[in-house]
Image: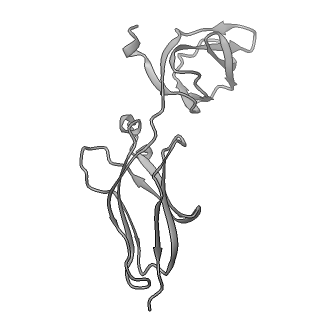
Amino acid sequence: MDPEDADRVKTQVKRSVRLQILFPSFRISKIALYEREQRVGEFAPAIDGNEIEWTPGPVGETELKVVVEGVNGDKFIPDPRRVKIVPNAPPDVRLTHTTLPLLAGRDGLVLSLRVTDPDGKKDKKPTTKKVKVDVYNFGQLIVGKTIPFRSDNSRAPNFIFAWERTPAGTYSIRVVATDKDGYTTRLKPIDFTLAPPQ
């Protein structure tokens, strides 16, 4: 098999590997998963398919092998599965517009963001095409929201944070985006001071 035809997974991310096995004629007691001949997981058979969590190793190519063991000691070993392990790319976050308040208690802070996930674009399930966006002030969470990320080339924002009538004070606003695998992107803080009205 050509390396480009191998399955692609991201490194250092727990992956649920779904195994489609043509069950042998004997009764199955357990199914083991091997990576580079090293046992990395074991699980009991299920009726509707079998899944196991597996944490990929370093970037590169590897091979997964399944060993099906019967209650009488019989074994069934399907063809190995080639896997290409690639680095995980964190979310891509672009600040498209910022409005800083001028007068405390009257104006509001507005942040417009375009958020996408380079890896997530390849996901086939719409439910996984989401990124969590958190907005902090000096480390304290102000708002957190999970949104569908941009999968097209549009520069239009898909996350807008509006803090109406921002009170007087000193602020250090930071945006953190987290993809479904737990990888994060942190924007540089937006620091400003808003004096009380005279």
Residue drawn at point x = 51 percent, y = 69 percent: 171
Residue 157 quadrant:
bottom left
Q: Is residue 5 visible?
A: yes
Residue drawn at point x = 61 percent, y = 28 percent: 55
Q: Residue 183 in the image: x percent, y percent?
A: 52, 41
**Residue sitting at the far right:** 72
Q: How many marks?
A: 0
Q: Nearer the viewer, residue 7 or 197?
A: 197
* As drawn, 67 above or below 150: above
* As drawn, 35 above or below 131: above
**Residue sitting at the far bottom:** 198
In the image, taking residue 161 as reference, residue 51 lies left or right, namely right
In the image, taking residue 46 as reference, residue 98 lies left or right, namely left
**Residue sitting at the far left:** 154
Q: Nearer the viewer, residue 188 or 65?
A: 188
Residue drawn at point x = 46 percent, y = 53 percent: 188
Looking at the rendering, in which quadrant would you find the C terminus?
bottom left
Q: Nearer the viewer, residue 52 or 150?
A: 150
* As drawn, 6 above or below 128: above
Residue 17 quadrant:
top right
Looking at the rendering, in which quadrant would you find the N terminus?
top left
Q: Residue 121 in the image: x percent, y percent?
A: 36, 38
Q: Nearer the viewer, residue 40 or 18?
A: 40
Q: Residue 77 in the image: x percent, y percent?
A: 60, 8
